[in-house]
Amino acid sequence: MDLRFLPQLPLTLSYPLLFGVLLVAGMLGGEAARALRLPRVVGYVLVGFAIAPIASAINIGPLLDEARIFVDIGLGLVLFDLGRRMDIAWLKRDWTLAASGIAESLLTFALVFAALSWLDVAPLAAGIAAAIAMATSPAVVLLIAQDTRSEGQVTERALTLVALNSLLASVVVTMLTASVHYEVRLDLDTAVLHPLYLFAGSLALGGLTARVARLLARQLERSPELHFTLLAGLILAAVGIAQAVKLSVILALLAFGMFARNDRNRHDLVNVDLGRASRLFYIVLFVITGASLPLSSFETAGWAALAFIGARAAGKFLGVVAIAPLGGMRWRQSVALGAALLPMSALALLLLHDVTRLHPAFGGEIAAIVIAGVIVMEIAGPLATQWALRFAGEAAPPPDPLAATRPPVARPVEPPRPAEPPKPAETKDA
């Protein structure tokens, strides 16, 4: 009997199957975390931690590595949404907002650099690790703000500061790449031209994509569904182009969002909500990120990892608390804003990947430190952000996960009151 029509064993896993498994597993992990009053993001990451040894045992680690396109797509959607929230007019009106972002970013860089240098980490490696530490995870802050239905000054300022420190981190890492080129004995032209190409090319790609988006939007009906499809398609195209021509995905997508928002023709695009419909990519983003983090980094990094985490947290808090009250924010709001900026995740790993891809030996010197910091802040960061938004009083009350399973409380039915006898008619004296 010819059985060649049957599939051959062992079965070969494909990207659609992997995406579906990671999506469903991450969703279940997120709902389990929500039942425990934890951020869904924590559940996504823990599922990734659990998948890592399974992936190693059944030898699908290489497939997970190749599936990082899902990470790039998810991060691209987040970065565009974040860049679109960066209102330049607001930064001009309230100088303390921009000052807070610059202060917390530079203070984080200075404290992390000083801590790592004190532990005898090479100056250039300490500088790149400190630049990566400036960035807050945009996906974590955005998802927790959505899940807690947060609205208010702290929420909006946190999202703007995340966009600002992500931009600053990308620029500083790009600038320090020139020094890395020079240190590994590349010629001076390459050391100067490559960072310039990354910076100028990424901004040009973001600006060009925003212009194309506006031109196409004018030809479409002003429907949220059509404009969502347009933006999602252009975001995916921008990610692919940035990877193909070796530009920075972070800078390109942030620039796309910023140019789309801060332009006199910005009303050509309908302000659609990308977050809800794009959550499936966000879930896979965190699951793959968790699965790709080697827990052995703590053994390699040692005390440097703790110094990295502590100095970064101090820089975020002190930078915000020193400037934010000057803009009229209360002490409670300033503390909450500092705590909301603590998460680290895929953005830091992407910055690290960009350095390691260019110079594997050099990137390996700081990889263990940064990855150990990301592992801690993948769990502690979402908890801090959720606490911050609730501490500021901007998060909606958490829903009771058992409310749907409880039977409705029956109200006692009051017996009808007896009718009062009619009053006798009053008689008038004759």
Image: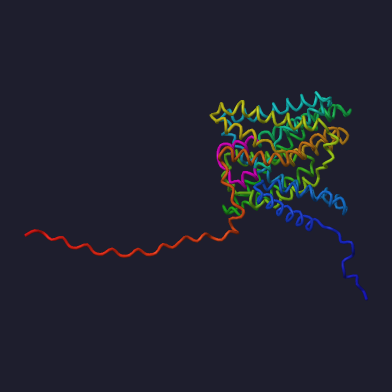
Q: Residue furthest right?
A: 1
Q: Which residues are magenta?
A: 142-161
> Where, quadrant-wise, is the N terminus in this rendering?
bottom right
Residue 276 in the image: state x and y as whole percent: 63, 51
**Residue 207 is at least partly visible in this image:** no
Residue 314 in the image: state x and y as whole percent: 69, 29
Overall secondary structure of the magenta section:
helix
Residue 331 in the image: state x and y as whole percent: 57, 30
Compared across the picture, whether 352 is left or right of 275 comes to: right
Residue 237 in the image: state x and y as whole percent: 72, 48
Q: Residue furthest bottom?
A: 1
**Is 38 a magenta residue?**
no
Compared across the picture, whether 67 is left or right of 88 comes to: right
Residue nearer the viewer, 225 or 124: 124
Q: Residue 378, located in which quarter of the rendered image? A: top right
Number of numbered discs visible in the structure rendering: 0
Colour basis: rainbow
* Residue drawn at point x = 67 percent, y = 43 percent: 80
> Where, quadrant-wise, is the C terminus in this rendering?
bottom left
In this rendering, the answer to whether 9 lies above or below 393 is below
Compared across the picture, whether 294 is left or right of 339 comes to: right
Q: Residue 384, located in which quarter of the rendered image? A: top right
Residue nearer the viewer, 8 or 119: 119
